[in-house]
Image: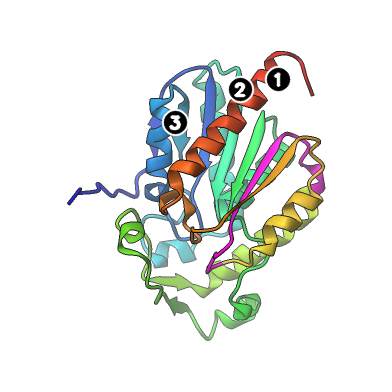
């Protein structure tokens, strides 16, 4: 049995002139992105997966942070990737809430392209919208998800979610809805058909609302929410790689 080295720490791989910033999800860590990061490292890309504020520590620490802190972590990572490397192209990709932050970054900062993976506009838990008023009385929500052991082996996540943080996620999603038309760069929107965490129609909404002239919507039939470590991950990595190469080539040749 292969032993998987799980770590909540960020990772940074120096490589070529194309950089990829990949952002993890809500209550997650870069561990859920490491197979993807290693794939692109081996392809010669420069890869950076930061650890968002309040994540990878404890639910109590996460409770002290909000969407502005997660957004600032994204901006800091973007600045580091740009300033420490003389890149020709910079792509941003994100899983779940990381996809939301990636789309916001593409709306507000210069990037070559954006990849969102299972990014929420709407979540499945209908109680989530009450989090903003419920958290003074109901501080934590226990996590009882039973994932495939092969997926679980890659994750470093909390056993309970701060309800206050769910309220902050709701605020972030409201900002995403307003900013989607500002996304004009090439975009690849990826969604698991059997997503147990978010409503899959989120992907169609994102695809329809962004203003990108070059955009693709790709559905995965056999994967769950944490698509980056699920059974179709090699297909996912290959599709993202193909998208990046296509967009980079068009950008180098001066095409819009």
> For the view shown, which residue lies furthest in the bottom direction?
137
Rendered location of residue 145, percent (x, y): 41, 73
In the picture, the disc for residue 63 is none
Residue found at x 48% / y 66%: 63
Rendered location of residue 217, percent (x, y): 68, 47
Q: Are marks 1 and 3 in contact (CB under 8 Å)?
A: no
Residue that numbered label 2 is attached to:
89
Comparing 233 with 175, the one in front is 233
The 10 Å Cα crowd at callout 1, few under 14, some 14 to 19, many 20 or more, is some
Label 3 vs label 2: CA separation? 14 Å
Residue 142 as seen in the image, left or right of residue 83: left
The 10 Å Cα crowd at callout 2, few under 14, some 14 to 19, many 20 or more, is many
**Tag 3 or tag 1, which sits nearer the N-term?**
3
Comparing 25 with 197, the one in front is 197
Rendered location of residue 80, percent (x, y): 51, 29
Q: Are marks 1 and 2 in contact (CB under 8 Å)?
A: yes
Asked whether residue 156 is in view, the answer is no
In the picture, the disc for residue 40 is 3
Residue that numbered label 1 is attached to:
251
Q: Where on the picture, by quarter, is residue 213?
A: top right
């Amino acid at each position: 049995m292969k032993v998987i080295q799980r770590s909540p720490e960020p990772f940074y791989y120096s490589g070529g002139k194309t950089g990829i910033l990949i952002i993890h999800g809500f209550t997650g860590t870069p561990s859920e992105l490491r197979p993807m990061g290693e794939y692109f490292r081996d392809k010669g890309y420069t890869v950076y997966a930061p650890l968002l504020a309040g994540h990878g520590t404890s639910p109590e620490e996460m409770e002290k942070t909000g969407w502005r802190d997660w957004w600032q972590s994204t901006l800091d990572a973007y600045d580091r990737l740009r300033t420490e490397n003389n890149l020709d192209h910079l792509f941003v990709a994100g899983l779940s809430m990381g996809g939301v932050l990636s789309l916001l970054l593409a709306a507000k900062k210069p990037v070559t392209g954006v990849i969102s993976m299972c990014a929420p506009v709407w979540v499945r838990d209908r109680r989530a919208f009450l989090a903003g008023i419920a958290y003074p009385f109901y501080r934590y929500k226990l996590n009882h998800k039973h994932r495939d052991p092969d997926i679980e082996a890659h994750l470093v996540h909390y056993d309970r979610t701060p309800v206050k943080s769910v309220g902050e996620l709701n605020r972030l999603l409201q900002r995403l809805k307003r900013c989607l038309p500002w996304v004009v760069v090439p975009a690849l929107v990826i969604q698991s058909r059997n997503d147990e965490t978010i409503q899959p129609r989120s992907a169609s909404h994102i695809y329809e609302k962004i203003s990108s002239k070059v955009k693709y919507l790709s559905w995965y039939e056999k994967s769950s929410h944490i698509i980056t470590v699920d059974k179709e991950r090699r297909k996912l990595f290959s599709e993202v790689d193909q998208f990046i190469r296509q967009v980079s080539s068009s950008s180098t040749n001066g095409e819009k």
